Image: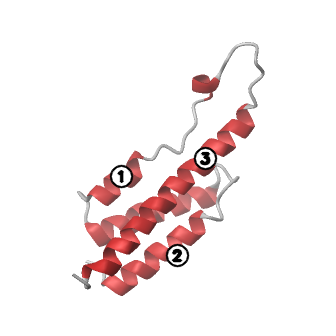
Amino acid sequence: MVERDKAVRLLERLRDEARTLGGNGQCHERFRYWHQQVEAVLEAIFGPDADELREFRAIRFDFDPEVFRIDGLGLDTAGAQNRYFIGRLYDAVDLLDSCIVGLRTQDSR
């Protein structure tokens, strides 16, 4: 179990780092390292069966261009993929923020 203040600092660092990943794409090594770190930190703080870890793992950063393919419309797949990826990063930031708030308010109950 990670001490509360350390857990908050770790989550804040990962949240802030997520905000710098936009546009790099899920194949980028930096994103993959960040993703692994988030999983490891969430598991260390909340446990391997925690809802927080399940929620993070449920965020699908991968983009299926077939879902957005519309014949004859010339969809900008690269642009759509980047917007989708950034949207999922925002989902992760929201989840990390929620974890931070939850940890900060634990002692105030």
Q: Horizontally, is 21 left or right of 11 in the view?
A: right
Nearest to the observer: residue 32 or residue 91: 91
Residue drawn 58% across the image and 36% down it: 63
Badge 2 local density, few (<14 within 10 Å), some, or many (20+)? few
Q: Horizontally, is 17 left or right of 109 in the view?
A: right
In terms of image quadrants, where is residue 20? bottom right
Residue under label 2, please give it. Answer: 13
Which label's residue is closer to the chain start, 2 or 1?
2
Q: Horizontally, is 93 left or right of 50 in the view?
A: right
- Tell me the amino acid under the disc marked 2: Arg
Q: Are marks 2 and 1 in contact (CB under 8 Å)?
A: no
Residue under label 3, please give it. Answer: 85
Badge 3 local density, few (<14 within 10 Å), some, or many (20+)? many
Q: Percent position (x, y) of residue 95?
A: 42, 60
**Residue that sits furthest to the front in the current view:** 109
Which label's residue is closer to the chain start, 3 or 2?
2
Residue under label 1, please give it. Answer: 55
Which label's residue is closer to the chain start, 3 or 1?
1
Residue drawn 62% across the image and 51% down it: 86
Element under label 2? helix
